[in-house]
Amino acid sequence: MQAKGRNLRKICVVTGTRAEFGLLRWLMEALRAVPGVRLQVVVTGAHLAPEMGETWREIEAAGIGIDARVEMLVSGDTPTAVAKSLGLGTIGFADALARLAPDLLVLLGDRYEILAAAQTAMVLRIPIAHIHGGETTEGAIDEAIRHAITKMAHLHFVAAEPFRRRVIAMGEAPERVFTVGALGLDGIAKVDPMDEADLAGALGLELERPFLLVTYHPATLAENACAGAEALLAALESLSEGTVLFTGVNADADGRRIDRLIRDFVARDEDRRAYRASLGQRLYLNAMRHADVVVGNSSSGIIEAPSLGVPTVNLGARQEGRPRAPSVIDCAQTPQAIGAAIRRALDPAFKARAARRESPYGEPGASDRIARILADAPLDGLLMKRFHDHAGDAS
């Protein structure tokens, strides 16, 4: 139950996408349960877009109140539209954060919506706690955004020890960097498993084998972000049996073009193909649990799928730099390479390897670990940062 009172520590969590809320939900729940903490939630970005499924409704359906909405998405499918959205987001966050006046602002990851919140909080002198810093994704602008937020942030929660060392190497004080594991593993532990029949009923699909779960987002540093999607669809066209379930595309440059390509592909064979703009965490994780292979370029194929024992075919450079489990197959974005990788992932010997559930991202429980630190961290002097010259050590 949410605490009330004047002297509560106000901790504000920002979410801009369905996937991000799936990761942050259990942290929000943990913060609501901490005595002396008042959770605030700000919703922005794709959550508020009708074409993206208005996924803010999933937040309210989970029983989590929304304290502010920041409309920021400019209609368009170009880098210019994204840049303008960033500016609108900064204006909207200025109003929202000035009104809410949180003691701490919690931001996850590396998207441009989150950059707008971070730069606003920096100017308003609101301390920032950043989750999933220190990682690399070399095929997207997310790489630069993530590291920029690290330099604006005051507390850092990383998924693995190599990421902690990288954040410290960027000049952050070691005592402010905490290795907590990946938030995505909490969802696996907390979401109730569904059997295949219940999942098929909830999706309204016949789940024929092989069952492929596909998520493809624009690689925002690529000159032609659609080329990889076209190669993926060409590879999937050659599949003669099974079910292919696509999830929605991020609100990035070229996202709408890729979305149209996928919808047209699905429309040509709706008996075996399906598209869902947003599944919600319960259906998404259960679809992953029952999939024969996860295909695309989403971080969920790198972080969550290995912990569910499901093979991943990861396309292109969007996730380049993240540690890999043995169940992840990286491949070039050509129809031939993608088709070969899918066949390898479906091989019984490779599926047996994936079933070992080896992961470099720790154990569930990150949400509770982060909530305890956020509730107890001293706030006095937190805004003052000194560049930590580590001289080769990350102790």
Image (cartoon, rainbow, N blue to C red):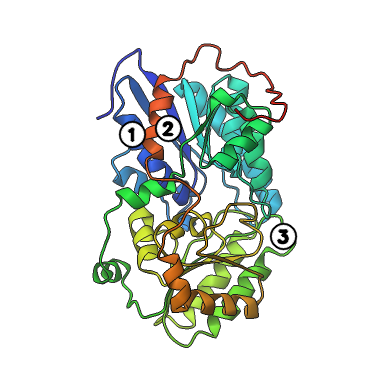
Residue most extreme to the bottom:
240
| Label 3: which secondary element | loop
Of 161 and 108, nearer the camera is 161
Classify 200 as above or below 394.
Answer: below
Give the residue number, with chain letter if any, for mark 2.
370
Q: Are marks 2 and 1 in contact (CB under 8 Å)?
A: yes
**Going by the image, does 323 lie left or right of 348?**
right
**Going by the image, does 30 lie left or right of 386?**
left
Classify 56 as above or below 393.
Answer: below
Identify which amino acid the numbered label 1 is placed on: Ala
Q: Which mark is residue 246?
A: none
Image point 32% across, 78% down: which residue? 206
Image point 66% across, 75% down: which residue? 334
Earlier sequence position, callout 1 versus callout 3: 1
Image point 39% across, 30% down: which residue? 371
| Label 1: which secondary element | helix
Of 326 and 340, nearer the camera is 326
Earlier sequence position, callout 2 versus callout 1: 1
Quadrant containing the N terminus is top left
Give the residue number, with chain letter if any, for mark 3.
222
Give the residue number, with chain letter if any, for mark 1.
30
Number of numbered tags placed on the structure image: 3
Earlier sequence position, callout 3 versus callout 2: 3
**Going by the image, does 129 lie left or right of 368?**
right
Q: Mark 3 vs mark 2: give the one in front.
A: 2
Quadrant containing the C terminus is top right
Identify which amino acid the numbered label 3 is placed on: Ala
Image point 26% across, 62% down: which residue? 194
| Label 2: which secondary element | helix
Of 164 and 126, nearer the camera is 164
Disc 3 versus disc 2: distance between alpha carbons?
34 Å
